[in-house]
Image (spheres, grey):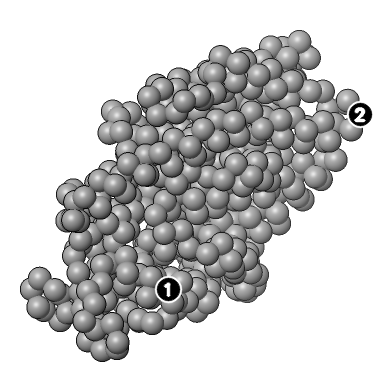
Amino acid sequence: METLKLLYLAIGPGIAIAVFIFYSNKLDRGPRTLALKSFFLGGLAVFPSHYFEGIVEGLMGLQALHNVDAPLYWPKTIFYAFFGVALAEEFCKFLFLKAFICDDREFDEPFDGIIYGAMVGCGFATVENIMYVLPNGQEVGMMRMLTAVPGHAFFGVILGYFIGRAKFSINRVRHSINGLVLVITLHGLYDTAAFSNISGSNYLIFAIVFVGIYLGLKAKRELEKLATVIQFSAKQFFPLKGPEKKIPLYLRDIRCLLSKGKLIPEDNLIDKKSGKIKSIREIFSTKMISQYRILPRIPFSGLPVKLFLIFYQLTFGLYLYFWYLGNNRDFTSYKKLKINPELRALSLFIITILPYYFYRIAPNALGLQRTNPETDFIFNLIMAGIETAFLNVQFKMFARFFKNKLEKSFSVTPITCIFFILSAIKKTLPLTVPFYLIWEIILIFLQGAVLALVQRDLNLYWHTEEKTTQAQYKDKLA
């Protein structure tokens, strides 16, 4: 039972982040097979990188990295962090992404680099997490869930950003090198802090992960705008050859032909308005983002209820945080709300996850006496209440927007109360109860089923908004 719990703790965070990133592409979601392939390749990249790390450890002497008083401790630590670990891991991820994914014809726009780079990073983090968490226990699993897993995932996003730009740019080598240098630098700083035994190194680790997440989300937002331009731009181009050379193509048509292999990024097209000849690499460059402001607001496609339930169960409920963030971001973007989605989601995560680290794990690590069962019960009820309060605020926001769009939608109070009851039972369930793991899986499924009712109405709402936007867009083009 303990091994199964550790396994969930090891694989849940990586899968949750992967699902969040993949389904954040609202316009032209690539094939799941290529995303799964990227995730699998990221997992495979662990083995050659760890082999290289082992060679460097042997050459330098592993003991030197654990003794601050050893000769040349800091030069050796920094060298190993940057060249023994960061370079090995990020270069392996880069090679797998470049060799097996980048040239696939389904990689048909720059934003795909974000998706597949993240998948590689999450796959790497998940396999590496299994290798560390199973032998070292819950404390290591909790710490890596907060640091190493999001670090690998968003370093992958950053690397994918530069790979995506490189594929659709005339400066391919420069973008690739810039991406590698940036992620190796961030990863090297992270490992330097992790390997050092100085006080305050944990704060530096969290700071570097935060910088990685910030840069990753910033890169993602930039290429999301570019993807929106490709989907909705009214600019047209003529092919130089082929039977369609007299038929003007919108940017979304060009993307479709790229995915079918009928065009390649090196092909040249004629701008209908200016008459200039441009390659698809130039046309799909980030210069097009300037058109973003004049485009219509884009509704979102939602997430199939069955997939939501699967993802919620596979991640042992951790997908809740990414679902919460994604919904806040969607409504903020579409309705121009004055809220900060990232800050809200981060607050939910910090308030409902970090207390467990300090309340349950820190006393064990420091050799302090554990609290009594009554205190544990009250603590878990408070955590369930805080979690439900965050969701209640979001549900009320949904209900406000659903009011004039859907004939009938979920009732906030019953959904909130049922979720709180299930969350409270799950958090207070004693480990000694017979078939504990089975009961926990059932409770997580029931939690997901309650949230699936909300997801069903979200899908109906976005479908309604999509119809309205498409009608407005057709009128604009006409």
Residue pointed to by mark 1: 259
Which one is closest to the eye, mark 2 or mark 1?
Answer: 1
**Viewer-nearest residue: 390 or 131:** 390
Label 2 element class: loop
Q: Is residue 143 left or right of residue 429?
A: left
Pinpoint residue 210: horizontal percent, then vertical percent.
42, 43
Cβ atoms at labels 2 and 1 below 8 Å apart:
no
| Residue 342 in view | no
Q: Amino acid at mark 1?
A: Ser
Mark 2 surroundings within 10 Å by alpha-carbon count, few (fewer than 14), some (14 through 19), many (20 or more)? few
Quadrant of the drawing holding the N terminus: top right
**Dot label at residue 451:** none
The residue closer to the viewer here, 244 or 302, is: 244
Query: Cα distance, mark 2 to mark 1?
Result: 52 Å
- Within the image, what quadrant is residue 248 found in? bottom left
- Position of residue 345 relative to residue 411, above or below, is below
Rendered residue at 80%/45% (across/down): 4
**Mark 2 or mark 1: whose residue is earlier in sequence:** 1
Q: As drawn, is 134 to the left or to the right of 73?
A: right
Q: Residue at x 32, y 69 (%)?
A: 253
User: Which quarter shows the C terminus?
Assistant: bottom left
Q: Residue at x 73, y 14 (%)?
A: 377
Q: Residue 42 appears at what percent x and percent y?
A: 58, 65
Image mark for residue 434: 2
Q: Residue 221 at x, y = what percent? A: 33, 50
Q: Going by the picture, which residue comes out furthest to the left?
A: 274
Q: Is residue 182 above or below residue 142?
A: below
User: Splitting the image into 4 quarters, where does residue 411 fall?
Assistant: top right
Three-letter code, disc 2: Pro
Residue 133 appears in the figure: yes
Q: Position of residue 125 (x, y in %)?
A: 59, 56
Element at label 1: helix
